[in-house]
Image: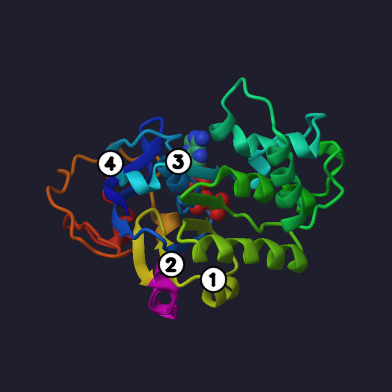
Amino acid sequence: MLRLHDLTLGYDRHPAVHHLGLAVEDGALLAVVGPNGAGKSTLLKGIAGLLRPMSGRIERTPSLARLAYLPQHAEVDRSFPVRVADVVAMGLWSELGPWRRLTRDHHDRVVHALEAVGLQGFGQRTLDTLSGGQFQRLLFARLMLQDARLILLDEPFAAVDEATVDTLMALVQVWHAQGRTVLAVLHDLALVRRAFPQTLLLAREAVACGPTATVLTPANLARTRGMVEAFDDHAAACDAPEATTEPPVHATAHRHDHGHGHDHGHRH
Ligand SMILES: Nc1ncnc2c1ncn2[C@@H]1O[C@H](COP(=O)(O)OP(=O)(O)OP(=O)(O)O)[C@@H](O)[C@H]1O
């Protein structure tokens, strides 16, 4: 299980998301949804261990120790003149370590992963020759080889066409069927409703979390709209005491209210 305990994350001591308390069960397929600036990427970076919590903590059971994180498209530099097959093979890093060479079996797995994402025959091409959609397919091939139990995808389908979404979404479904836990930041609500059993609706705080149909209601979506704009990026750090107990909820939002309304924008 992945648990967030009264988690606040931010930059330069300014909170970006605050007081998240929720539990995501092992094997969940969870969409993270919310307006621009809601803190979705920040949350994924926090879970990936790239941002230290300002307060609160993230707990992962050992079953989720092996983690793979796919950052937003724009954050990945693909001007390196390296070969597609070599980038995919980087997914084997945790298995190989720095010194071991690829065996025949490893090469076969790279070829298989490229086939699975529809990039057969692309192995010898260099990264800079790929289209945006092809590059995203390559990143999914690398993810396949990482064999992670917890997979974090930040807008994996931004700027890719429908056929690519279908191919990559089929892979996500396979990972889900294999019992892996997948969290994906998405803006396509139709896709979320169709393919993601659970959703976290985020607007600097957890607005709702649980079965997608109960989270993506018109009322919840309307509430999120004003919440992000009203949040003050330069507010002082929150002095609210950390919650001492966490409710044992399944992918359920746990909101802290310290006596201020939403019209105050935030509680920091
Ligand atoms: N490196 C950073 N330094 C300072 N502030 C940041 C940094 N990254 C994000 N922020 C701020 O944190 C807040 C949340 O940003 P974040 O990228 O997590 O939102 P998001 O929900 O992923 O948005 P989008 O849908 O636009 O990608 C925003 O106000 C943003 O300006």
Crowd rating for badge 4 (residues with CA inside 10 Å; few <14, some 14–19, many 20+): some
Q: Please, what secondary structure does the residue beneath circle 2 have?
A: strand
Residue 215 in magenta? yes
**Residue under numbered circle 3:** 48
Which residue shows up at 47% across the image and 41% down it? 45
Q: Is residue 187 left or right of residue 42?
A: right
Crowd rating for badge 1 (residues with CA inside 10 Å; few <14, some 14–19, many 20+): many
Which residue shows up at 72% across the image and 36% down it? 87
Q: Is residue 125 left or right of residue 142?
A: right
Among the two numbered marks 1 and 4 on one chain, the one whose residue lies closer to the N terminus = 4
Q: Is residue 71 left or right of residue 103?
A: left
Does the residue at mark 2 contact the one at mark 1 (Cβ under 8 Å)?
Answer: yes
Among the two numbered marks 1 and 3 on one chain, the one whose residue lies closer to the N terminus = 3
User: In the rendered image, which quarter is residue 27 located in?
Assistant: bottom left
Which residue shows up at 48% across the image and 57% down it? 182
Q: Quadrant of the C terminus?
A: top left
- Residue type at tag 4: Arg
Per the model, the C-alpha gap separating discs 3 and 4 is 13 Å
Comparing 83 with 162, the one in front is 83
Among the two numbered marks 4 and 2 on one chain, the one whose residue lies closer to the N terminus = 4
Q: Which residues are the magenta region?
A: 211-226
**Residue under numbered circle 2:** 199
Per the model, the C-alpha gap separating discs 2 and 1 is 8 Å
Among the two numbered marks 2 and 1 on one chain, the one whose residue lies closer to the N terminus = 1
Per the model, the C-alpha gap separating discs 1 and 4 is 27 Å
Does the residue at mark 3 contact the one at mark 4 (Cβ under 8 Å)?
Answer: no
The answer to whether residue 195 is above or below residue 179 is below
**Residue under numbered circle 1:** 192
Q: Please, what secondary structure does the residue beneath circle 4 have?
A: strand
- Residue type at tag 2: Thr
**Residue under numbered circle 4:** 57
Crowd rating for badge 3 (residues with CA inside 10 Å; few <14, some 14–19, many 20+): some
